[in-house]
Image (cartoon, rainbow, N blue to C red):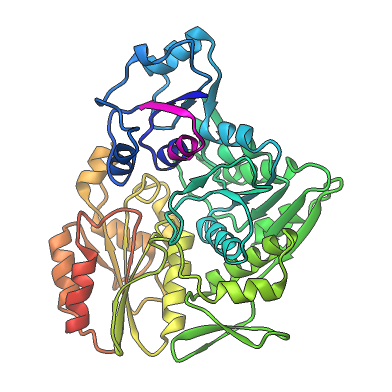
Amino acid sequence: MQVHFIAIGGSVMHNLAIALHHKGYQVTGSDDEIYDPALTRLQNLGLLPAEMGWFSEKIHAGLDAVIVGMHARKDNPELARATELGLPLYSYPEYIFQQSLHKQRVVIAGSHGKTTITSMILHVLRFNNRVFDYLVGAQLEGFDTMVKLTDNAPVIVIEGDEYPASPTDPNPKFLHYHPHIALISGIAWDHYNVFPTWEVYVEQFEKLADSLPKSGVLIFDETDDMLDVIGKNERLDVRPVSYEAHPHKINNGQTFLTTNDYGDVPLLVFGEHNMKNISGALAVCEELGLTQAQFYRAIQNFKGAANRMETLAKNDKSAAFKDFAHAPSKVEATAKAAKAQFPKRTLVACVELHTFSSLNKNFIGQYAHRLDDADVAVVYYNPHTLAHKRLDAIEPSEVKAAFQRDDLQVFTNNEALQQFLLEQKWEQSNLLMMSSGTFGGLNLKELAGKIIKN
């Protein structure tokens, strides 16, 4: 099989390319920019394009498939050539489906928690020596790639998002997987540039629920008001399974699951949102034939997905965490979790406004009161990012008004932000840095080390 990737450097795209290479496929690809870790990983396997750019001559009649990523534009010359030749053309979710036609397909969706829930399921399956394929949106400890495709695995677990499948296909990625089991973790409006209204956003999840086949299973968080409605809609021969936060307790900064039959189960993760994630993962694992005992044994040493409440540094009196949280609901849940885990410590929570939605004046009001659990609330954004995204300038006073917190500290210079943080008193205090970006290139590990020494 000869497969060509248009935009091979994407997070999932390069992992899919590697997975097909391991299957023995002949893989080629193009991109106009590729960064680490994709660059090094592709280079090590001989899959890195010889030069950056798009080359229509790479597209030929001998290709069995062409896979196009979202980074490519509609007028991409390689895409045009593939269309001209009538080659089989796929988005990566369409191709994943083709590779899993004879497998039981499990799709984990939702505005928040889907990476963590998928990661929990994969961890539990591997701990119990199950054979499975997967696609997950973050690098996991103990897993070489983010995509695995084999011929013998009976099941594939897929993290599925609601965003367009390709430059030429506006349909949500998760609809192309055609799941037998779907989990929806929650619905909170995000990505204003893709889904201009709440109603349009919710509609994508309704489509997913309605797409389930007869004998399908829909697993959902019953504490989410919108999901409670979607999940309980009548669907012919589709079985609804609801869940809520797993019973738990916190002792001396550590969270334990409380169970009737297995005692207190110690965890390495924490937060009310993670207790919901655990319940969702447990429901999926039970559908796949695992027992509760098998699940609880495995979940005890789950460390979390990369950049999800990751510990940067800690001592007996303080700790510093970073988290991928950037959407309003994620910021609120993460800050709440950090405060609940260490209620006697001062929480300094800092969020970077980095995405198109978070920097849009029509959306920023969604952040109202999302940092209320922080004792010291901080927001950073880079005016150059606004200019790059061609968005209207935002004044610090507008950010304060949006968060509805008069004592909010707002920074547009990362050096000033770092100096402010270093000047805080860190005994019996924790730092939480939340962003899908880099705070303008701040070395968070180094910053955390200095704070812990104070």
The C terminus lies in quadrant: bottom left
Is residue 144 rendered magenta in the image? no
- Is residue 245 visible in the rendered image? The answer is no
Say whether residue 252 is left or right of residue 410. right
Vertical side of 342 occupied by 205: above or below: above
Q: Which residues are magenta?
A: 18-29
Q: Quadrant of residue 178?
A: top right
Vertical side of 343 occupied by 288: above or below: above
Is residue 23 rendered magenta in the image? yes
Total marks shown come to 0
Residue nearest the viewer, comparing 252 with 25: 25
The furthest residue to the right: 236
Say whether residue 15 is left or right of residue 153. left
The residue shown at (21%, 48%) is 383
Q: Where residue 158 sits in the image (x, y, percent)?
A: 58, 48
The residue shown at (62%, 46%) is 202
Q: Quadrant of residue 8?
A: top left
The furthest residue to the top: 84
The residue shown at (25%, 89%) is 427
Vertical side of 236 occupied by 21: above or below: above
Say whether residue 220 is left or right of residue 58. right
Vertical side of 406 occupied by 235: above or below: above
Q: Where residue 295 sits in the image (x, y, percent)?
A: 64, 71
Q: Where residue 327 sits in the image (x, y, percent)?
A: 43, 56
Say whether residue 385 is left or right of residue 278. left
Residue nearest the viewer, comparing 283 with 161: 283
